[in-house]
Amino acid sequence: MAAGVLQIAGLAKRYGATAAIDNVSLDGPSDGYASLLGPSGVGKTAPAFSHGIGFVLPSFALFPHLSVYSNIAFGLENRAEGAPLGKGEPRDRVHAMSELVGVAGLESRRVHKMQPSSPRE
């Protein structure tokens, strides 16, 4: 099997005694995409920058006229291919992703209210 364009083997990052990432490996196909998701300030762009990988800052990837919920749901609602989503599935996926990236409960906010320096409480 041919190696993918993106290969990571044994990636680790520590902050003092705390392991932020420990022994992560992956091999991405040459015709695929990969994304790093997480709350602001956790170092998502630091690994990309230090390894010469292109990245898009979050503010450029958001639609300012849409709510947090609508920004997360955009890709699900505008799928070009794949099986149709069942009733309630987009809502469930948006909720799960909101939990994952730390914005659960803030889905009705406009994205301009969600700058990295904004409190998430």
Image: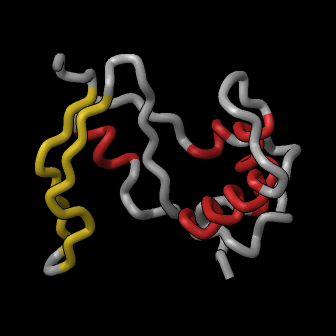
Residue 84 is situated, as x and y percent measured from the top left of the image, at: 76, 36
Compared across the picture, whether 49 is left or right of 116 comes to: left
Give the side of residue 91 with respect to residue 7, left or right. Answer: right
| Residue 51 place in picture, x, y as percent | 23, 35
56 horizontally vs 92: left or right: left
- Colouring convention used in this rendered image of the protein: secondary structure
Give the residue drawn at x 24%, y 34%: 27
Quarter holding residue 5: top left
Count the marks: how many? 0
Residue 59's image quarter? top right
Task: Please state the horizontal and vertical placement of residue 68, each as a whole percent of the image.
Answer: 77, 56
In the image, residue 40 above or below residue 83: below
Q: Toward the viewer: 18 or 86?
A: 86
On the image, the x and y values in percent for residue 13 come to 19, 61
Q: Residue at x 18, y 21 (%)?
A: 3
Residue sitting at x 75%, y 43%: 85
Q: Closer to the camera, 49 or 81? A: 81
Quarter occupied by the C terminus: bottom right
Is residue 4 in sight in this rendering?
A: yes
The structure residue drawn at horizontal position 71% and vertical position 42%, both measured from the top left corner, is 62
Residue 111 visible from this viewpoint: no
From the image, which quarter does the N terminus lie in? Answer: top left
* Residue 77 in the image: above or below residue 114: above
